[in-house]
Each structure stands twice: as structure tokens, then as C-alpha cells.
Image (cartoon, rainbow, N blue to C red):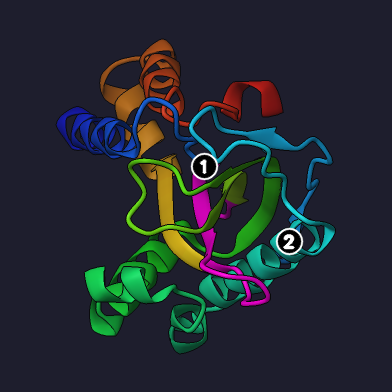
Amino acid sequence: MVRQFQALNDRAIEQVKNQGSESPTPAPSSTAHGTPEEINITPDSAPGRLPSPDQRAQVPRVIGDFLAALDGGQTAKAYDFLAEPQRKLETFNAFASRITRFNAEAGPVKERRIVKVTWTKDPAHAPAAGVYAAVDLVSRFANIDRHCGYVVLYQRDAPAPLRVMRQEDVYMSNEQARQIEATKSRQSVDELWAQVAKNCPNYGSSR
């Protein structure tokens, strides 16, 4: 189990590295609460570019609807939120299989919370030109108390809607935590999770 969780840790670290050093990571219902009002802009964003009121208003609505579809097992509806570049990277069958496996492991959602939104336009290492909003999340499920991650939203041109360019989960299941504690210690659980949670830059400040 320790090896299994370490593999998860390695995967999370690699995902964050692939985002680039200047890019953000990322209730009983699936609605994402707590959208911050602060506007955060990455250093490599096009100069003088701020998100419009409409773009800012879209974020909690799109995130809430996308997460509700994910958590409700509505894989076809959730897949419709994906931007075209992301659909080329992940087929519907692969997407549906990934979401179904995660939902089976996680159990019903208990909380979804937005902890930060970071904006950028035409960043140098992005897969396509346009506006990006990286939405950092903290979540809890029936079988997962330790979860963070992010959803990257993308808009090629206004007034096109924001679409999902990327979605990642970083977590330790309660069963993993129990097995690590049984073979190691509670401190080992906390230390391992602290390592993984570093891949969610805003997780610590959200607790």
C-alpha cells in the first residue's frame, strides 16, 4: 500500500511539473462553493489583460455544472464540457472509464469547494492561444477525506463559453490511509499526504 500511494505521489508531482513553474495547479451537493473575488493573473499572461465580469461569472456556474455531472456519473454530459483539444487527448471511452473508477472508489460527494481562481491569456507554453482560468479545488467524499485538485477552463474567443481543458484529482483514499496507519503510523499518513498536498498550492491555506 505504501508503494501504491508513493506511485500516486510520483504521478501527481509529474503532472504539476508538466504544468510549468508559472502555471497554477488547480455540501452534500456537487456545487462548488466559495468562489474567491480576488483576480489572480499569471506572470506570463498577455499584458494588461483582465477577465471580464462575464468570464468571472461563468467560472462557478461552469465548474458547478461540470462537477455535478462528474459526481452524478453523467459521463456523457461531463464530456460535453471538454474543450476540443482535450477531446483529442482523451476519448469518451477513456474519460468515462476514468470517472467511473474514481466515483466507485470515492463514493458520494460530501463537499466541493473552490479555493482559488487564476487567470492567464495566451501563455507561452499553453496548447492553444486564448483565455485560461485554473480553478483550485478542495473536496471530500464518503470514502476520501483528503482530496485536492484543479480544473483548467479555456475560452478561445469571446463570447464562446468556457470549456474544460484539463481536470486532475490528487487524493489519498480513507482505505489507503487506514492501511498505511496499520503498517506504519498515523504520522506516516500525515507525512505522505503532506507531500502529495504540496502539488495543490492552495490546499494548505484552505484548511
**Could you say which quadrant of the image residue 47 lies in?**
top right
Inspect the image, locate mark 2, and give the three-letter code of the amino acid beneath it.
Answer: Gln
Q: Which residues are magenta?
A: 141-163
In the rendered structure, the answer to whether residue 204 lies left or right of residue 22 reads: right
Alpha-carbon span between mark 1 and mark 2:
17 Å
Q: Which mark is residue 74?
A: none
Q: Secondary structure at mark 2?
A: helix
x then y, percent, for residue 90: 26, 71
Q: Which mark is residue 26?
A: 1
Q: Secondary structure at mark 1?
A: loop
Residue, disc 2: 55
**Could you say which quadrant of the image residue 128 lies in?**
bottom left
Q: Residue at x 51, y 63 (%)?
A: 107
Most distant residue in the bottom direction: 76
x then y, percent, for residue 27: 77, 56
Q: Is residue 2 visible?
A: yes
**Could you say which quadrant of the image residue 2 lies in?**
top left
